[in-house]
Amino acid sequence: MSIEDIRVLTSRLAADPSSLVFLPLGEALRRRGQLAAAEKIALAGLTRYPDLADAHDLLARILGDRGDLERAFDEWDIALRLDAGHAGAHKGIGFLYYVAGDLPKALEQLESAHAADPGDDGVTAAVARVSEALATPDGAPARPDTRQA
């Protein structure tokens, strides 16, 4: 998203602070690495929409990018309590379990994300990668034998 697009979204949010435009604006700022601004936008949106799972998912992704994985987990947990089938929250929690080395829980969450959004190629690949890791004795992904006979 261009800087001009962000300016337009910012203007729209300023004109109507109750608008859901805070979601794409916060995401655009997050993707540009402007995490402090993105977090401020997400928190302001959450004050207006505390029961919106997408708002908690946005904040969780921002917190994850900032390295605050515990708070990210908490926000994704809230999103799932609000919407048990929220693909983004399942995907995020799956990633956190993967990072923590809990592959069975990671796979469970990623499979839930895949069921909620079967068209997400990233989730499909993650499910395959974690499944493969679980199928090997040491938990590492299987590697083809490239030695010459």
Image (cartoon, helix red, strand yellow):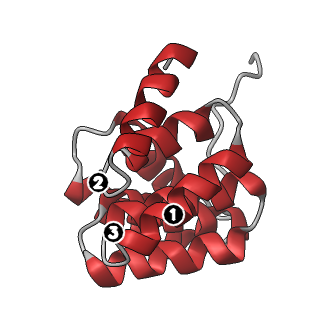
The residue shown at (66%, 61%) is: 63
Whether residue 108 is visible: no
Tag 1 residue: 44
Which badge, 3 or 2, comes first in the chain's sequence? 3
Type of amino acid under label 3: Ala
Mark 2, residue position: 114
User: Decide: marks 3, 1 in contact (CB < 8 A)?
Assistant: no
Between marks 3 and 1, how big is the CA–CA gap?
14 Å
Hey, which residue is sitting farthest bottom in the picture? 81
Q: Is residue 29 above or below residue 118?
A: above
Residue at 44%, 69% (x, y): give it.
46
Residue closer to the observer: 101 or 73 = 73
Element at label 3: helix
Query: x and y percent of residue 70 in the render?
Result: 69, 77
Counting the numbered discs, the total is: 3
Residue type indicated by callout 2: His
> From the viewer's perspective, is residue 22 above or below residue 91?
above
